[in-house]
Image (cartoon, rainbow, N blue to C red):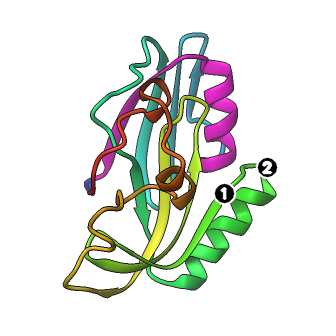
Amino acid sequence: MASSVHISLNVSSLDRSVDFYRRFFGEPKKLKADYAKFVADEPEIHLALQPGEVRGSGAVSHFGIRVDSTEQVRRWKGSLEGRGLPTTEEKAEACCYALQEKFWVSDPDGNRWEVYTVLEDIEQKADAGMTCCQPKTEAANPRSEEESHGVAACC
């Protein structure tokens, strides 16, 4: 059996989160009144959702899916937008010592997902005063602590 990543999230509304992740990853493999599990093949990921306390300033900065090309980033973006998920695109963005092509999407509890490809590695972070690994709109207009959901200084 190949290795895979398993993530388990507490969610404030299982129904809203199932709706979001259904559009993000497809139909859940398991759906109960108090639990949902999504298993995606590409990338291989096992995501479990259960109602529970959602901490407004947890340790998670964001989740990411790295793909092989700019074309794959565009395909993911078009597919998710076609399923009704709003995205925030960034082209040739210097972040975390890499030049990246990416977009962002957030679930109902503010967990941010980045779908990206690395165009090239770079030796310097972007602007040292800027926060890395978050959409530019958030860097320009930081959210309150309750809304920030653990935005970190960089990845």
Where does the magenta region start and end? 4-24
Residue in the foreground of this view, choosing between 137 and 14: 137
Quarter of the image with the N terminus is bottom left
Left or right for 123, reference 73: left
Residue 129, placed above or below residue 85:
below
Please identify the residue farthest to the bottom as the structure is shown: 120
Disc assigned to residue 87: 1
> Residue flagged by tag 2: what amino acid is it?
Gly
Please identify the residue farthest to the left as the structure is shown. 123
Residue lying at 44% horizontally and 30% vertically, measured from the top left: 48
Eyeballing the image, is 89 above or below 113? Answer: below
> In the rendered view, does 43 fall on the left or right side of 137?
left
Residue 13 painted magenta: yes
- Residue 86 visible in rendering: yes
Q: CA distance from mark 1 to mark 2?
A: 9 Å
Q: Residue at x 30, y 62 (%)?
A: 129
Name the residue that disc number 2 marks: 84
Q: Secondary structure at mark 1?
A: loop
User: Along the line of sight, which residue is nearer the eye, 36 or 149?
Assistant: 149
Secondary structure of residue under mark 2: loop
